[in-house]
Image: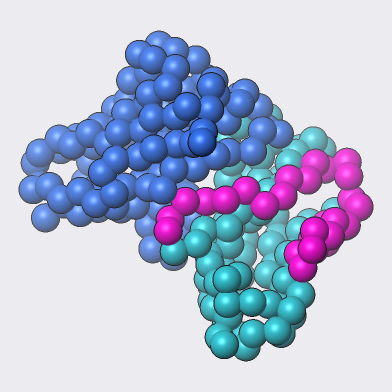
Amino acid sequence: AQKVTQAQTEISVVEKEDVTLDCVYETRDTTYYLFWYKQPPSGELVFLIRRNSFDEQNEISGRYSWNFQKSTSSFNFTITASQVVDSAVYFCALSEGAQKLVFGQGTRLTINP
Amino acid sequence: DGGITQSPKYLFRKEGQNVTLSCEQNLNHDAMYWYRQDPGQGLRLIYYSQIVNDFQKGDIAEGYSVSREKKESFPLTVTSAQKNPTAFYLCASSMIQGANSPLHFGNGTRLTVT
């Protein structure tokens, strides 16, 4: 069965620090997709990135970067030079086959000024 | 602007009453979904629909019902059979039913049943 584990329930850092959010997944399929979503205080989840299982290239988008390692079944998310606006709950999710995403428990990130 | 509208934002009901949560999208997406979020937990899928007049149960469908009479609308009814209905409910849509299609979410409805 699919499973996504975000072991960090809450993280609190001071603004401008770098922070990494961990995501470990379990799946038996060779074809699958991984996602990260951000949930700000307003409530809606915002799509950040999608990765398929055949693309292990790391990705950078501004201050955000993602490290996908199939060998350790991990898809970690790093925010460089964090800002107060990055405060949110972040979810990692896994999908295989039909569009039934399995979400991790989420990591609440607080960036203090 | 295109998006997903959920209403109301907050909803209060007495135990034993059915309640319907609204979800409307103008993104012309085929697939729509309902998720439930509880504190400290990830999102759990209640129901999803790939096309008008068709829907499938998700992982926690018991005590819920849906309809998909129009492409734009996917209302969720929380029935009195749902044993623990107090939660945050999120509606989402995607362009196609498929593992690689990102979801677009509404702002959610927080339901409190006393």
Supply the letter of whichever chain is cyan. A
Residue positioned 58% across, 77% down in the render: A84
Compared to A2, does A62 lie above or below? below
Residue positioned 68% across, 77% down in the render: A82
Rendering coords of residue B50 (x, y %): 52, 20
Which residues, given as a range, are shown in magenta? A42-68
Compared to B100, does B87 lie above or below? below
Rendering coords of residue B7 (x, y %): 29, 40
Magenta segment includes A27: no
Supply the letter of whichever chain is blue. B
Q: In this view, does B105 lie to the left or right of B114?
A: right
Magenta segment includes A66: yes
Q: Which of A59 and A33 is in front in this view?
A: A59
* Quadrant that contains the C terminus of chain A: bottom right
Q: Is residue A15 left or right of residue A61?
A: left
Rendering coords of residue B43 (x, y %): 47, 50
Q: Looking at the rendering, which quadrant does residue B78 occupy?
A: top left
Q: Looking at the rendering, which quadrant does residue B73 occupy?
A: top left
Q: How is the image coloured?
A: by chain
Residue B36 seen anywhere in this rendered image of the structure: no
Residue B100 seen anywhere in this rendered image of the structure: yes
